[in-house]
Image (cartoon, helix red, strand yellow):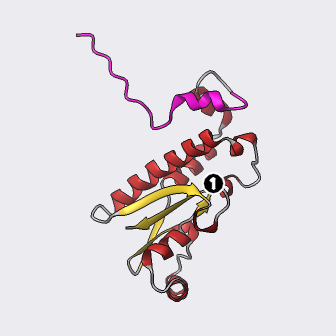
């Protein structure tokens, strides 16, 4: 039996043609020709970040203070600021502009909507998997949009529905 099945990546390999500078003849080659091992490790952390739960609220740990007393105090201030609206608190804390992922790395790709949306799709895929792994019985939403929660340009957020 000669059966062949290709299971597509979550990344559309045609996005490679949008790259201003191509380092190789494929996405795989480009990555191998562009990154150090430390880059892969740090990207893996961004795709599967630490998540903290404080009094039932879910936050990306890097966006929230993880010291217990400070975390509870900060949450109390946010509850006051957002009238205890859990969804808005989580959206606000977990919002992050795509540009902030690349501080000091400004390039033409940051103006390419196809590339930005592909980046957003990748983040949504991995953050959703992480959330479902940690909270299988909760309705966690990960989404991105332009100007979300006052962020500049495209931004991503995570919250419980």
Image: 61 above or below 142: below
Is residue 32 among the parts visible in the rendering? Answer: no
**Which one is in front, 73 or 116?**
116
Residue at (70% x, 41% y) in the render: 109
Q: Quadrant of the N terminus?
A: top left
Decide if residue 30 is on the left or right side of residue 128: right
Which residue ends up furthest to the left in the rendered image? Answer: 1
Residue 64's image quarter? bottom right
Q: Identify the residue position indicated by label 1 in the image.
A: 98
Q: Is residue 10 magenta?
A: yes
* Residue 107 percent across, percent down from the top left: 75, 43
Residue at (53% x, 67% y) in the render: 94
Decide if residue 27 is on the left or right side of residue 58: right
* Residue 148 percent across, percent down from the top left: 58, 63
* Residue 69 percent across, percent down from the top left: 51, 87
Residue at (44% x, 73% y) in the render: 87
Image: 55 above or below 20: below
Say which element carries label 1. Answer: helix
Q: Which residues are magenta?
A: 1-22
Image: 77 above or below 118: below
Is residue 38 among the parts visible in the rendering? Answer: yes
């Amino acid at each position: 039996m000669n059966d062949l099945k290709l299971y597509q990546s979550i990344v559309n390999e045609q996005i490679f043609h949008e790259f201003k500078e191509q380092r190789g003849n494929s996405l795989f080659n480009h990555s191998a020709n562009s990154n150090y091992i430390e880059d892969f490790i740090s990207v893996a952390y961004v795709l599967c970040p630490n998540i903290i739960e404080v009094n039932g609220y879910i936050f990306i740990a890097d966006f929230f203070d993880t010291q217990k007393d400070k975390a509870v105090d900060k949450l109390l201030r946010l509850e006051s600021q957002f009238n205890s609206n859990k969804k808005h608190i989580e959206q606000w804390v977990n919002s992050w502009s795509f540009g902030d992922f690349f501080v000091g790395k400004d390039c033409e790709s940051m103006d390419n909507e196809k590339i930005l949306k592909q980046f957003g799709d990748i983040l949504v895929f991995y953050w959703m998997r992480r959330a479902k792994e940690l909270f299988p019985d909760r309705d966690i939403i990960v989404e991105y949009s332009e100007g979300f929660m006052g962020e500049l340009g495209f931004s991503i957020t995570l919250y419980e529905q």
